[in-house]
Image (cartoon, grey):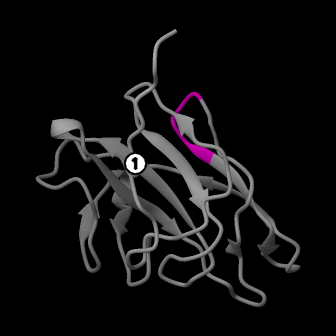
C-alpha cells in the first residue's frame, strides 16, 4: 500500500456549526457523512450535521438539527454517541442529557422530502400546503 493523502473536509467552530465532534461518522450511499457535535450550534449544546462532497474536491457542511437545553422539554442535548440510519434514510441517535427527566433521549431525525407537486422543497415559516382529506401542512417559527 502506498502513501495516504490527508485533506481537511470541514473546520468546526466558525459560527453555529457546532464544535467537539466526538462520535464516529457514518456514510450514506451518496457519499455524504453524518455525525454529531457535543457542543456548539445555535443553542451551544450540540448539533447533528452532514458533510457533502461538492465540486472541485471541496466539501460543504450543513447543520441538520440544533439541540436545545430545556429543563423539562422534550429535546435532549450533548449528543456523544454515533448515529445510525434505517432503511428509509432516517437518522437515530442519543443525547447524554435533556428530555423529560434530564437523563438523556433517543431521537429520530427524519429528512423533509421534496413535494412532488410544489415549486419548492422546504417549508419556511408561514408556508401552508394543502394535503389530502382537508389537512393543512405548515411551518411555524422555531421548526428545524
Determine whether, in the image, residue 107 is placed left or right of residue 139: right
Position of residue 54 measured from the top left corner of the image (x, y, whole percent): 23, 41
Q: Is residue 144 within the magenta segment?
A: no
Q: Tell me the quarter of the image containing the C terminus.
A: bottom left
Residue at (38, 79) in percent of width and height:
15
Determine whether, in the image, residue 51 is placed left or right of residue 72: left
Q: Is residue 48 above or below residue 30?
A: below
Position of residue 141 measured from the top left corner of the image (x, y, whole percent): 38, 84
Q: Which residue is mark 1?
A: 8
Residue at (60, 59) in percent of width and height:
21
Quarter of the rendering containing residue 84: top right
Please identify the dominant SS of the magenta region: loop
Position of residue 43 measured from the top left corner of the image (x, y, whole percent): 54, 84
Residue projecting furthest to the bottom: 71
Residue at (57, 37) in percent of width and height:
26
Q: Secondary structure at mark 1?
A: loop
Determine whether, in the image, residue 47 is placed left or right of residue 3: right
Of the pair 16 and 72, the residue shown nearer to us: 16
Q: Which residues are magenta?
A: 87-91
Of the pair 32 and 85, the residue shown nearer to us: 32
Q: Is residue 60 above or below residue 89?
A: below
Q: Is residue 106 above or below residue 17?
A: above
Of the pair 31 and 113, the residue shown nearer to us: 31
> Number of callouts in the render?
1
Position of residue 5 measured from the top left corner of the image (x, y, whole percent): 40, 30
Determine whether, in the image, residue 45 is placed left or right of residue 121: right
Amino acid at each position: 500500500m502506498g502513501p495516504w493523502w490527508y485533506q481537511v473536509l470541514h473546520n468546526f467552530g466558525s459560527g453555529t456549526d457546532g464544535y467537539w465532534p466526538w462520535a464516529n461518522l457514518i456514510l450514506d450511499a451518496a457519499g455524504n457523512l453524518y455525525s454529531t457535535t457535543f457542543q456548539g450550534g445555535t443553542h451551544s449544546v450540540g448539533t447533528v450535521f452532514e458533510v457533502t462532497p461538492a465540486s472541485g474536491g471541496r466539501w460543504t457542511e450543513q447543520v441538520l438539527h440544533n439541540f436545545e437545553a430545556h429543563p423539562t422539554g422534550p429535546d435532549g442535548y450533548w449528543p456523544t454517541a454515533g448515529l445510525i440510519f434505517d432503511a428509509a434514510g432516517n437518522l437515530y441517535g442519543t443525547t447524554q442529557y435533556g428530555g423529560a427527566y434530564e437523563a438523556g433521549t433517543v431521537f429520530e431525525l427524519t429528512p423533509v422530502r421534496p413535494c412532488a407537486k410544489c415549486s419548492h422543497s422546504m417549508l419556511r415559516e408561514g408556508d401552508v400546503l394543502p394535503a389530502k382529506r382537508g389537512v393543512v401542512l405548515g411551518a411555524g417559527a422555531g421548526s428545524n
